[in-house]
Amino acid sequence: MDDTLPAALTGLAVNHVEFYVDDLTAHTAELVDGYGFTVAGVTDPARTSVDSGSVALRQRDITVVLTEGYTGDHPATEYVAVHGAGVADIALVTADARAAFDAAVARGARPVQEPVVRPDTGAVTATIGAFGDVVHTFVQHGPDSEHRLPPGLRTVPPLEHFDADSRLSTLDHVAVCVEAGRLDSTVEFYRQVLGFRAIYEERVVIGEQAMLSTVVQNDSGTVTLVFVAPEGADAPGQVNTFLSDHGGPGVQHLAFSTDNILTSVAALRDRGVACLETPATYYTLLVDRLEPDAYTVPELQALDILVDEDHDGQLFQIFTRSTHPRGTYFAEIIQRRGARTFGSGNIKALYTAVELDHANHRASTR
């Protein structure tokens, strides 16, 4: 096979991420009230069948679509029955959806939906399989597409809410859990079919747990996927728990970037979003690892924010507490100050801090 990447697959970017949900109203309220998103588009009955309803939510350069199936055989209904609410489609914008679809299928992708042209806007969409039950829809916006919303949705003013206090700006990366032994084949799919490259690999050992991680990115650096797999199918740990509870591979979390994580996390907390707590010992031990370059340790500790660094700089991150009934989806808030990695040092640091806290507690109760 010719390794030259077809033009239609170059410069891909995330157009939107689509969740299949069981309660459109409740999930919309969570993202609007909690995360500061604005409703930018809704299902247009004149353009879409009545077997489902969708809402497009937007904050700066992030677009999230929520879709609820209203019939038993709708794909959203079937997805939710197996996995619960979750990410079902990472849609990629391209200049030529038909050519992108044909090229991807020729390079080994599983066709899911042949190219479809929307007569009202001229937009073209086509879908291929990705991992588990998650797909990639190629989106080619037509000349009459409304504000680059996903096809089939009509705009709802105001279109944007650039002044959201949560200050979330872009989708930094998508974190995906895959089964033990499937990491290499998943990475190879993205390399062979979409021309992505592996930019980072790591083995993380936490006590009795071991995880393998590979990060893939497209040619323009605008789409980043972090794939994580347990080292063994029966090994303890959060990845195997996710795979069991989710019913197979899927998206564990979306990471939203911000230019000021203190402001963002404070706003999210004020809006009712709960984040994971960090043991005080983490910050006691932090001075032996690094010195934060943008915020003070007390500022970070007050909001439970983590910090890590690599050769290129630092990153600050925090994870929200999952509200999913199965606990299989949450969000990450991340601010990069040069760092290109994904905070694996925090995984080890948190584990060490928790273990030390436990040891101190045992010693104090003797």
Image: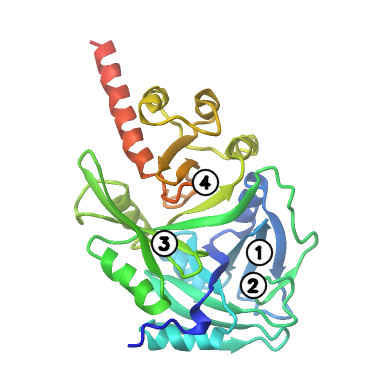
Instruction: Report if the CB atoms under discs 4 and 1 are less than 8 Å apart.
Output: no
Q: What's the mark number on residue 150? A: 2
Disc marking residue 336: 4
* Secondary structure state at the residue bearing disc 2: loop
Q: Which labelled disc corresponds to residue 83?
A: 3
The reply to whether residue 113 is in sight is no
Please, what secondary structure does the residue beneath circle 1 have? strand
**Residue 209: % across, % down:** 23, 44
Q: Earlier in the sequence, mark 3 or mark 4?
A: 3
Look at the numbered discs 2 and 4 and tell me whether their residues touch, using CB distance below 8 Å: no
Separation of marks 1 and 3 at Cα, in angstroms: 21 Å
Circle 1 residue: 56
Sequence-wise first label, 1 or 2: 1
Q: CA distance from mark 3 to mark 4?
A: 32 Å
- In the image: residue 95, left or right of residue 200: right
Q: Residues within 10 Å of mark 3 (few under 14, many from 20)?
A: many
Tell me, yes or no, if residue 47 can be seen here: yes
* Mark toward the start of the polypeptide (2 vs 3): 3
Q: Are marks 1 and 2 in contact (CB under 8 Å)?
A: yes
Q: Residue at x 34, y 74 (%)?
A: 189
Q: Find residue 281 and report its horizontal and vertical position in percent.
A: 38, 23
Gap in Å between the C-alphas at discs 2 and 4?
A: 29 Å
Q: Nearer the viewer, mark 1 or mark 3?
A: 1
